[in-house]
């Protein structure tokens, strides 16, 4: 089966819902989201977005079902994922794996021991059909469809993504992973991820993203909603390696209850324009949020990335560590926000932004917004921008390294704080990606 929908109209939105056999409330939701998309303009901040929405393919699937055995995945799709080692990673390291190819999940599997514990891990479309009450309770409650043009677009045409529910007092000792591949020209991918980590539980979820390079642009506009319960912990690790023809416009947000912890480990490599600011709403007292990120921009690439921390509860804490690298005329900038509400007494936040600019054609900006609305909380913000030190280069080259190897060593040292948070397999992949870029 090869179902394809190009261009966006109300009829296309209805047809997507019909193909998926969705309940009436979801069909109506999609139409409301489409109407919001039609009336909203592009964001008034960040880089200029020149997207031709009439040329985008909004829905395409390579198979008519989600496969649970790797052998049953269509050969073309299987060969694509085989090349990046996905089956081996699942067998050696992961508790569960989902793979999405263009618009739909194409493969999904999970260890039986997790199913026996009541853990749910499936694609989001399946969750709507199999767990409708749980799905509807959380869907569109943290990221509203009409917040901006691209949350509205996602609401209208969302397809695929991951749905995870971890029952109370359940800790997963191995990560769950999803891998997203845009494989077609002029393709749009609009996955919707919904994660609920219940009281006293712990989850590590990992996400990888790639796309081949075409002469025309592709669009990735995802929405992620995460709910972290009392005394629960969630870590969300992303390494995106989009090609330089992809607009990556993603809204990620987590709500953290009392003494809960949310950690965003966010790697932004590639894409034509990347706008992504993972957020934590620290609702409960003693809740905590961390975001450690890197953004790498080379020729004709703009990385407009950062993080948001909204403190509502008392004694809440947040930490943002942002590492940016700009070379070859790229633009790697930090855009972030920390807000301490009036009731968030005795709270604290630390923001540290470091940038390396590799040549005179590249640029970087730090654009923070920090607000403290009470007398007992505080924010520390530090930002540095530097070039590769000629003294360091000279020292390393005097020890027998070439200039290329010396630069590579300096860059790897610069992002060491980010790499040490990654599983070994992801750290190795990151090293290979950066060597390719610089």
Image (tube, rainbow, N blue to C red):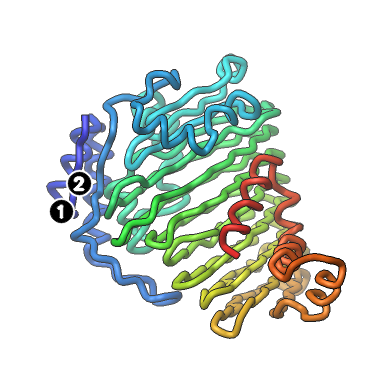
| Residue 330 place in picture, x, y as percent | 52, 74
In depth, the one of 159 and 74 nearer the eye is 74
Q: Secondary structure at mark 2?
A: helix
In depth, the one of 352 and 430 nearer the eye is 430
In depth, the one of 231 and 15 nearer the eye is 15
Q: Secondary structure at mark 1?
A: loop
Q: Quadrant of the N terminus?
A: top left
Q: Quadrant of the C terminus?
A: bottom right
Q: Residue furthest left?
A: 11
Q: Residues within 10 Å of mark 2 (few under 14, many from 20)?
A: many
Q: Which mark is residue 203?
A: none
| Residue 304 place in picture, x, y as percent | 51, 69
Where is 315 relative to 82, above or below? below
Q: In the rendered view, does 292 fall on the left or right side of 210?
A: right
Viewer can see residue 153: yes
| Residue 136 place in picture, x, y as percent | 39, 36
Q: Which mark is residue 9?
A: 1
Tell me what residue is drawn at x 68 percent, y 54 percent. 289
Tell me what residue is drawn at x 12 percent, y 47 percent. 11
Looking at the rendered structure, the number of numbered marks drawn on it comes to 2
- Per the model, the C-alpha gap separating discs 1 and 2 is 6 Å
Tell me what residue is drawn at x 46 percent, y 64 percent. 274
| Residue 204 place in picture, x, y as percent | 64, 38
Q: In the rendered view, does 141 fall on the left or right side of 289?
A: left
For disc 2, the marked residue is: 13
Residue 333 position by quadrant:
bottom right
Where is 201 relative to 438, above or below? above
Where is 252 relative to 63, above or below? below
Residue 364 position by quadrant:
bottom right
Tell me what residue is drawn at x 72 percent, y 60 percent. 412
Answer yes or no: do the residues labelled 1 and 2 have beta carbons within 8 Å? yes
Viewer can see residue 279: no
């Amino acid at each position: 089966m090869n179902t394809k929908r190009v261009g966006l109209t109300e009829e296309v939105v209805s047809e997507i819902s019909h193909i998926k056999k969705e309940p009436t409330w979801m069909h109506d939701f999609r139409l409301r989201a489409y109407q919001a998309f039609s009336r909203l303009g592009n964001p008034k901040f960040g880089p200029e977005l020149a997207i031709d929405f009439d040329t985008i393919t909004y829905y395409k699937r390579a198979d008519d079902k989600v496969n649970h055995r790797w052998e049953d995945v269509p050969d073309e799709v299987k060969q694509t994922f085989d090349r990046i080692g996905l089956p081996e990673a699942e067998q050696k390291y992961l508790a569960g794996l989902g793979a999405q190819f263009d618009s739909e999940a194409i493969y999904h599997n999970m260890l039986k021991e997790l199913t026996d514990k009541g853990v749910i891990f499936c694609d989001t479309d399946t969750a709507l059909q199999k767990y409708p009450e749980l799905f509807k309770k959380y869907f569109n409650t943290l990221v509203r469809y009409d917040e901006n043009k691209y949350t509205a677009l996602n609401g209208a045409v969302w397809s695929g993504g991951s749905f995870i529910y971890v029952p109370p007092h359940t800790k997963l000792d191995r990560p769950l992973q999803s891998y997203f591949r845009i494989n077609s020209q002029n393709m749009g991918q609009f996955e919707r991820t919904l994660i609920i980590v219940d009281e006293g539980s712990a989850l590590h979820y990992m996400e990888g993203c790639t796309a081949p390079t075409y002469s025309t642009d592709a669009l990735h506009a995802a929405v992620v909603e995460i709910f972290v319960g009392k005394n629960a912990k969630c870590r969300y690790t992303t390494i995106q390696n989009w090609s330089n023809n992809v607009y990556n416009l993603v809204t990620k947000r987590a709500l953290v209850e009392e003494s809960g912890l949310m950690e965003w480990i966010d790697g932004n490599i590639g894409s034509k324009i990347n706008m992504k600011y993972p957020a934590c709403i620290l609702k409960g007292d003693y809740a905590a949020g961390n975001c450690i990120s890197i953004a790498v921009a080379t020729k004709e690439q703009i990385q407009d990335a950062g993080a948001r921390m909204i403190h509502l509860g008392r004694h809440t804490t947040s930490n943002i560590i942002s590492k940016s690298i700009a070379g070859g005329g790229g633009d790697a900038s930090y855009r972030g926000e920390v807000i301490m509400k009036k009731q968030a007494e005795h709270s604290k936040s630390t923001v540290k932004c470091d940038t390396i600019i590799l040549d005179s054609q590249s640029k970087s900006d730090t654009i923070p917004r920090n607000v403290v609305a009470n007398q007992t909380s505080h924010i520390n913000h530090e930002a540095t921008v530097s070039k590769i030190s000629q003294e360091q280069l000279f020292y390393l080259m005097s020890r027998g390294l070439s200039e290329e190897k010396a630069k590579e060593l300096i860059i790897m040292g610069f992002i060491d704080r980010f790499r040490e948070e990654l599983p070994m397999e992801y750290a190795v992949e990151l090293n290979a990606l950066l060597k390719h870029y610089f």
